[in-house]
Image (tube, grey):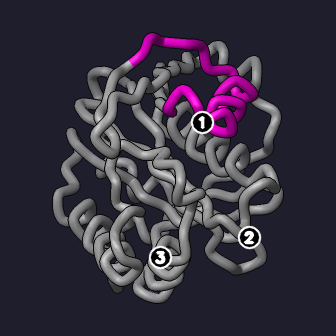
């Protein structure tokens, strides 16, 4: 079975309304369709990578290639876990947790997006809470970081709700103009103080060596 060679397929995170897991081909196809349908107002570009400005078929194909590339490049000292989030059995978005030299630094970063028709329901907070539980409680992280453009108020609100503190700014070029990103950092004590969403983790132990821990 594939899970014997790639135990990440057995990893499952649960929140009150969501399940997060590594997508197989069918779930990956659902996520690609969701991305192709749009994840933000076309007048705004909330990502450094301008992938959502491309034609819909290219967006879908590029998303599939991105996931395959992350699996192929996975190393215990440099990994990118890209999960799908399901509500009532339907793919609503994706949540990532990334680590480089995690065994030494004990620091990970997060990223996410939700399909437009599923936004405004508070699902982003549960998605982030799920991977924070994985990072801190499951893998022993000391810090988790995030970044959002200065005008991405929804993402910033999620970070503040979950206990993050401001950690400086970064400057990017998006659509040919400079854009300011707000960096945020969450330490273990702040995570524990703000922790309020119940999360359960299944199937982590067989996958633990893949994270370098």
Front one among 145 and 33: 33
| Crowd rating for badge 2 (residues with CA inside 10 Å; few <14, some 14–19, many 20+) | some
Q: CA distance from mark 1 to mark 3?
A: 21 Å
Whichever of callouts 2 and 1 sits on the residue coming sooner in the sequence is 2
User: How many residues crowd around disc 3 within 10 Å: few (fewer than 14), some, or many (20 or more)?
Assistant: many
Q: CA distance from mark 2 to mark 1?
A: 24 Å
Magenta stretch holds residue 80: no
Which image quadrant: the C terminus? top left
Work out whether residue 198 can be spotted: yes
- Describe residue 170's horizontal placement relative to residue 157 as left or right: left
Name the residue that disc number 3 marks: 36
Residue 19 in which image quadrant:
bottom right
Question: Vertically, is 120 above or below 198?
Answer: below
Q: Please, is residue 83 above or below residue 201 in the view?
A: below
- Mark 2 / mark 3, whichever is N-terminal: 3
* Residue depicted at x 71% and y 31%: 157
Q: Secondary structure at mark 1?
A: loop
* Percent position of residue 90, x then y: 68, 79
Name which residue lies at 79% across and 54% down: 120
Quarter of the image where one finds residue 116: bottom right
- Nearer the observer: mark 2 or 3; the answer is 3
Q: Which residues are magenta?
A: 148-169
State the mark number for residue 152. 1
Residue 186 position (above or below residue 129): above
Dot 3: what SS?
A: helix
Q: Which mark is residue 21?
A: none
Horizontal and vertical percent position of residue 181: 44, 26
Q: Are marks 1 and 3 in contact (CB under 8 Å)?
A: no
Q: Nearer the viewer, mark 2 or mark 1?
A: 1
Taking 203 as reference, is 161 left or right?
Answer: right
Circle 1 residues within 10 Å: few <14, some 14–19, many ≥20: some
Across and down, in percent, residue 168 comes to 44, 11
């Amino acid at each position: 079975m594939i899970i014997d060679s790639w135990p990440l397929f057995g990893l499952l995170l649960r929140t009150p309304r969501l399940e997060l897991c590594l997508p197989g081909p069918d779930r990956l196809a659902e996520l690609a369709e969701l991305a192709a349908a749009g994840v933000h107002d076309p007048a705004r570009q909330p990502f450094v990578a301008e992938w959502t400005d491309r034609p819909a078929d290219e967006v879908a194909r590029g998303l599939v290639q991105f996931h395959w590339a992350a699996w192929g490049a996975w190393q215990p000292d440099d990994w990118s876990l890209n999960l799908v989030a399901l509500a009532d059995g339907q793919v609503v978005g994706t949540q990532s947790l990334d680590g480089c030299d995690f065994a030494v630094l004990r620091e990970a970063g997060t990223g996410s997006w939700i399909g437009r028709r599923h936004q405004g329901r508070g699902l982003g907070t549960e998605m982030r809470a799920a991977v924070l539980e994985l990072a801190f409680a499951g893998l022993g992280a000391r810090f988790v970081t995030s970044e959002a453009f200065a005008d991405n108020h929804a993402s910033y609100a999620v970070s503040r709700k979950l206990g993050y503190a401001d950690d400086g700014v970064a400057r990017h070029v998006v659509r040919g103009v400079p854009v300011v990103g707000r960096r945020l950092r969450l330490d273990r004590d702040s995570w524990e103080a703000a922790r309020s969403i119940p999360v359960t983790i299944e199937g982590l132990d067989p996958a633990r060596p893949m994270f370098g821990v």
